Image: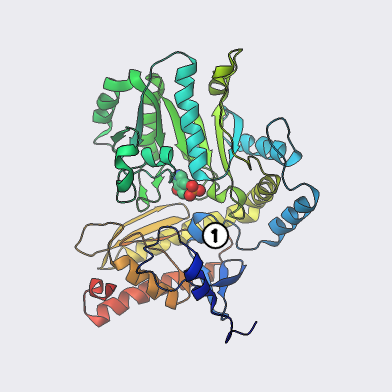
Amino acid sequence: MNTLIQPLLAERDKAVNWHPYTHMKTAGDVIPIVKGKGVYLYDDEGKKYIDAVSSWWVTLHGHAHPYISERVFQQLKTLEQVIFAGFTHEPAVQLSENLLKLLPENQKKVFYSDNGSTAVEAALKMCIQYAYNLGKEKTKILAFRNAYHGDTFGAMSVSGRSIWTKPFGSMLFEVVFIDTPNAENLESLKIQIRRIAKEVACFIYEPLVQGAAGMLMYEAEYLDELMKFCRTEEILMIQDEVFTGFGRTGKLFAANHLTEIPDIMCFSKGLTGGTMPMGITTCSQEIFNAFLSDDKYKTLFHGHSFTANPLACTAALASLELLLQEKTLTAVDRISKQHSDFAKIISKHPDIENIRQTGTILAFEYKTGQNTSYFNEIGKVLYDKFLQRGIIMRPLGNVMYLVPPYCIASEELDFIYRNILEVLDTFKNQDHCPTDAAD
Ligand SMILES: *Cc1c(COP(=O)(O)O)cnc(C)c1O
């Protein structure tokens, strides 16, 4: 196509598209990506970018993976979609069987949806209706203060109140927010929960890592204690592994770091290796049984047009196969190890603080003297500097983090680390407060 006549893709985009989490008034030109391969994305001028954030934490095995694309292509030619009420198909059955084998033993049933938010919606509805079906009055929900569980209304309600949820504040249902547990606050958390336990329908949490809050991390030991307490108080637990699932934390699931088990689990993001949108909510037999009744009003009336889409199920099956290969599990270990080596180096940097790591997730903060927040202007400056260097990082305010695809080579990780140090150096050399350069 002649680019002299045809406006550039970025301009055509601006005319018609509204981008997610984007302040459209001040947004710069978006970058047209024409191709992905492994850990790289290529723009329309042939410049390549290393995807250090797995395209919003979804890509596991690299972009346009030949094995996944071949499997999906074959499925596309065979069966692309069928209504999942009254019908089933091999990819959905196989995927449920394969996934359940990897989860805590009490997880017995798989409910399909389209993304992380809908997986959370389904989980919340299961818990609330569980109480309803048993004739119990339970109206309260427990969640962590900095939680993020998605952008639909139920998921927003159980997420921490922030600038993201502000316009909808009065429309969100009430949730009791508690702090993440540690050695100091555990007992007071229990006291807080015990007071309302009888009225609590469920407790929803991101295990070990609170992603969107800025990769905040807390220890498995104290989550275990809290879960054990919820169990004795008969509070249902929803473990949102939308982000932590499929190897991110160094083990297959965050559940593998814990001894206590949840009643319900949510998955998405890495579920299909980051190739197709899909959400999964799994639950225990006990939850499922509360909906098994002669009374039709006890049915879970929830579903989406594309429930258990065969293409997405096939992508997930192929991705799981790749994930369980020795080669991939070794790569997860290697990335975790490389991260902790780099954590030691960067911890000595005078402008960096709060270094934290869980498996393949590494985060650290640029000292700005301001409070850490999403709007912390430094994030935009860093984002642009890394882009110039061909690295896609998307700092959450002053929190820099790495969540690479597992196919990343050790030299490619070193390239990112090296550039982080260099970018930090440019700040020092310019000898000015980087926040000045924000606009
Ligand atoms: C991203 C995320 C969600 C929402 O998933 P979407 O697919 O973006 O709707 C829910 N929970 C957690 C923990 C997440 O990180």
Q: Position of residue 23 (x, y in %)?
A: 36, 63
Q: Tell me, what colour scheme is on the image?
A: rainbow
Depth check, front residue: 204 or 400? 204
Q: Position of residue 134 (x, y in %)?
A: 48, 14
**Residue 304 against residue 68 in the figure, above or below:** above
Apparent side of residue 280 relative to residue 378 in the rendered image (left or right): right
What crowding class fits label 1: few (fewer than 14 Cα within 10 Å), some (14-19), or many (20 or more)? many
Q: Which quarter shows the C terminus?
A: bottom left
Q: Position of residue 316 (x, y in %)?
A: 65, 47
**Residue 21 against residue 43 in the figure, above or below:** above
Q: In this figure, which residue is indicated by the disc labeled 1? A: 405
For badge 1, the amino acid type reads Pro
Apparent side of residue 193 relative to residue 202 in the rendered image (left or right): left
Picture quadrant where residue 332 is located: bottom right
Depth check, front residue: 257 or 291? 291
Asked whether the viewer can see residue 243, the reply is no
Residue that lies at the very extreme toward the left in this rendered image: 369
Residue that lies at the very extreme toward the right in this rendered image: 78
Q: Position of residue 350 (x, y in %)?
A: 25, 68
